[in-house]
Amino acid sequence: MSATCVILDIGGVLEITPDTGWVRRWDGRLGLPPGTVNERMRDVWQAGSVGSISEQDVHRQVAARLGLDGPRVEAFMSDLWDEYLGTSNDELIDYVRGLRGTCALGILSNSFVGARERETERYHFDELVEQIVYSHEIGIEKPDPLAFEAACATLEVLPEHCLFIDDVAANVEAAREAGMQAHLFQDNARTITRIAAHLDTGRAR
């Protein structure tokens, strides 16, 4: 339980995930006022993020609530995953890959049912870090302190030996309250510098 540890978020950190406007486009395609799709789907999105609904049931709810047939459900979900998965932050991923064997490495991500399979296929995060803790698999989302406890327990590390990196300020603050070091991701250069400093401190322990 003494390993120096780095735990990273995925969306906005390891993945570059700008707003693609896909939901607004679907509002328009369906002739609905702006915001209607998200309003109708809000509880489904929440259920998917904590794993209380299956991916198959998400598809059923999309069909029922938006009046879409099978092919259009597939098109809708394809647009969702295109934004969700974004593109890889290659510079940071390459840096983290170079850390393997020097510290414990993990991911803690607020996620959606189906994310593990898609991110493994596209980005191989399972080969980048030792453990991935997804909110849809543990039923808990950041900034709940239990999410950070789950990540540390899964990696078998102490919170005070961990640096957590996220692009959401509330999650960074919650990690600090849980006893971890934490860094708000803004760009790769500052994040890499912060990780290096954390590892130097760990080596000095």
Image (tube, rainbow, N blue to C red):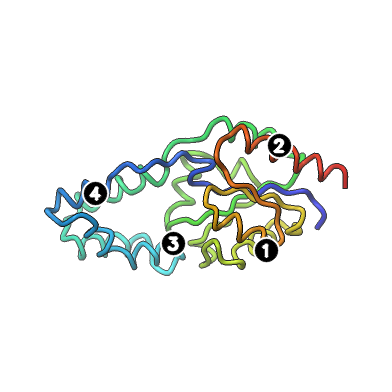
Q: Earlier in the sequence, mark 3 or mark 4?
A: 4
Q: Which numbered disc covers residue 178?
A: 1
- Left or right: residue 168 versus residue 36 is right
In the rendered structure, which disc, 4 or 1, sits on the residue that comes first in sequence?
A: 4
- Circles 2, 3 touching at the beta carbon (< 8 Å): no
Q: Position of residue 108 (x, y in %)?
A: 58, 54
Image side of residue 36 versus residue 152, left or right: left
Give the residue type that dot 4 points to: Arg
User: Would you place residue 131 above or below residue 46 in this image?
Assistant: above
> Which of the marked residues, 1 or 2, is nearer the chain's N terminus?
2
- Residue type at mark 3 is Ser
Asked if disc 1 and disc 2 are in contact, CB closer than 8 Å, the reply is no
Could you say where residue 33 lies in the image, as x and y percent from the top left? 16, 57
Q: Amino acid at mark 2?
A: Leu
**Contact between labelled residues 4 and 2, with CB atoms less than 8 Å apart:** no
Q: Is residue 16 above or below residue 84?
A: above
Mark 3 vs mark 1, CA separation in Å: 22 Å
Sooner in the amino-acid sequence: mark 3 or mark 1: 3
Residue wearing tag 4 = 24
Residue 113 location in percent, x, y? 42, 58
**Mark 1 residue element:** loop
Q: Residues within 10 Å of mark 3 (few under 14, many from 20)?
A: many
Q: Report the Cα–Cα distance between label 2 and label 3.
A: 29 Å
Identify the mark nearer the N-term, 2 or 3: 3
Tell me which residue sits at (88%, 48%) in the image: 205
Residue at the spot of label 3: 49
